[in-house]
Amino acid sequence: MKGLYLVTDRDLCLGRPLEEVVVQAVRGGASIVQLREKQISTRDFIDEARRIQAALAPYGVPLVINDRVDVALAVGADGVHIGQSDMPYSMARRLLGPEAIIGLSVETMDQVLEAEAYQVSYLGVSPVFETRTKTDLNGAWGLEGLAQVRRRSRHPLVAIGGIQAANAAAVVQAGADSLAVVSAICSAPDPYQAAQALSQPFHNASAPARRATQ
Amino acid sequence: MKGLYLVTDRDLCLGRPLEEVVVQAVRGGASIVQLREKQISTRDFIDEARRIQAALAPYGVPLVINDRVDVALAVGADGVHIGQSDMPYSMARRLLGPEAIIGLSVETMDQVLEAEAYQVSYLGVSPVFETRTKTDLNGAWGLEGLAQVRRRSRHPLVAIGGIQAANAAAVVQAGADSLAVVSAICSAPDPYQAAQALSQPFHNASAPARRATQ
C-alpha cells in the first residue's frame, strides 16, 4: 500500500463518466481505487463496480469497495474499505478471506491502537486536514497527529482528507505511505495531470511511474 | 413459506422498540420476519439484526434481511429478501448457499416468468394493493393479478402491500401462500392481536396457532 490512492465520488466528476476519470487517474499514477457510493441501489452499485473493474483490468490496479462487503463479494473485488460505522473488521475478514485488501478508517488514537490487533491492509488516517467531502468527522488529525499515528501503528498508513499537490510532500514526510484523494482528482480539470502531480512525492522516493499497460 | 410474514419498519412502530413489536407479532402468529432498514449504517444494521435474531431465537422463527447480503452473512441470518434493484438472484444464491431463504419481489409478469428459472424460496407479489409503505411501484397487482401470478408461477407466493385483517382472507383465496404486512402490525395498537387477526385465514386452513415456545 504505497502511492496515490483514488477514492471516487461520482458527483464531483464535473459530469464526466466515472470510468473516464478513474482511467485518467490511473494513467497519471494512482495505484489503487476505492469505489464509494452511498445513495445508489445495490444493483446499480454492482453494475458500476463491474464497469470500473473492467476499466482497471488493463492496468493491474486493485479495486476496493467502500463499506459494502456484499458488493465486493458479488463482483470479486480486491477488497473493501471500511469505516467505524461499517461492518466490524473481524466479520469483514471472515467473509472476504485472508487475501482480501481490508482498509480501516481511524479517526481517534483509540481506534489506531485497537487496530493493532487486526490484520488490516492499511489504516485510513481520516481526515488529515479539514474537508467537505467527508461529514462524519472527529476533527482533523493534522500532520502532527499523522506523525503520532505513524509512531504508534504497525500498519501502512493511507492519509485522506484535504490532500492536494501543494501539501502532498509534507503528508508523506509526516508518515503517510499513501495519499488518498477525492476531489483533487475527481474535480480536477485534468485528472491525469492531477494524478501525476499528486504522485510526485512517490516518484521522488524513486517509485517508478505507472505506464498504461503495466 | 406459509402464514403471516412480518416486514419491519422501525419508523412505523409508534415509538415502541422494534424487538418488542417483533416478539408480539410472532407470539400472535407471524411465522417469518424480514428486517428492513434503508437509512442506517451497516454497523447499526448488523447490531439490530443480532438483537432481532436473539429475540426470535426462542420461537424458531426465521429472520431474513432486506437487500443486504453482507448483513445476512455477517449475522448468519436465515436469508434475504431482494427486490429488482437489489443484488441479482443468482449472485445472492451463490453467496448465501443452497439452503438460504431467498425471496424475490416481482412487480411485473415478466419478472414472474423470469423467476421460474430461479430456485427462489418465494416470490413477493408486490404490491397487491396500493400502499404508502413502498415507493418503487409499477402499479398494484390487485386480486386478479395475484391470481394470474398463482397460475403462472411454480413458487410460493407472499403477497404484500395494503393487506389488512379485512382483506386477508380474500388475498389467500386469490392464491397467496403467505401474507406480508408492515404497518398493519408495526403501527397496530396491539401487534399481538393484529397478528392474531391477520393469521386467521391460515388457522381456518387448519394451520396450528404458534405458541410462545414452539
Image: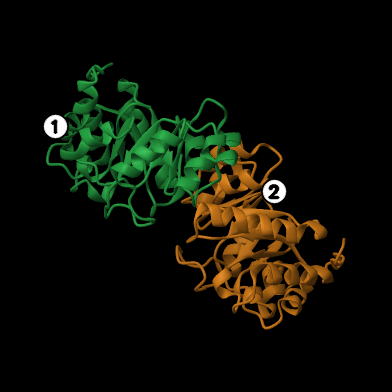
Chain colours: A green, B orange
Q: Is residue A157 above or below residue B21?
A: above
- Which residue is situated farthest in the bottom direction here? B189
Image x and y of residue A76, in percent: 48, 31
Instruction: Report whether residue A53 is seen.
Output: yes
Identify the amino acid type marked 1.
Gln
Circle 1 crowding by C-alpha within 10 Å: few under 14, some 14–19, many from 20:
some
Q: Residues within 10 Å of mark 2 (few under 14, many from 20)?
A: many
In the depicted structure, whether residue B27 falls above or below residue B33: below
Label 2 marks a residue whose chain is B
For this rendering, which residue is in front, B28 or B198?
Answer: B28
State the residue in front, A102 or B104.
A102
Say what secondary structure mark 2 lies in.
loop
Share a chain, discs 1 and 2?
A: no
Q: Which residue is mark 1?
A: A193
The residue at the point 25 percent across, 46 percent down is A162
- Name the disc covering residue A141, or none: none
Say which of B110 and B75 sits in front. Answer: B75
Q: x and y percent of residue B42 in the render?
A: 52, 52
State left or right for residue B187 relative to residue A157.
Answer: right
**Residue drawn at the location 23% of the way across and 17% of the way down:** A206
- In this view, the mark in front (1 or 2): 1
Dot 1: chain letter: A
Residue A140 point in image, percent of width and height: 32, 51
| Residue B78 tag number | 2
SS label for mark 1: helix
Using residue A112 as the reference point, say whether residue B155 is left or right of it.
Answer: right
Q: Quadrant of residue A185?
A: top left
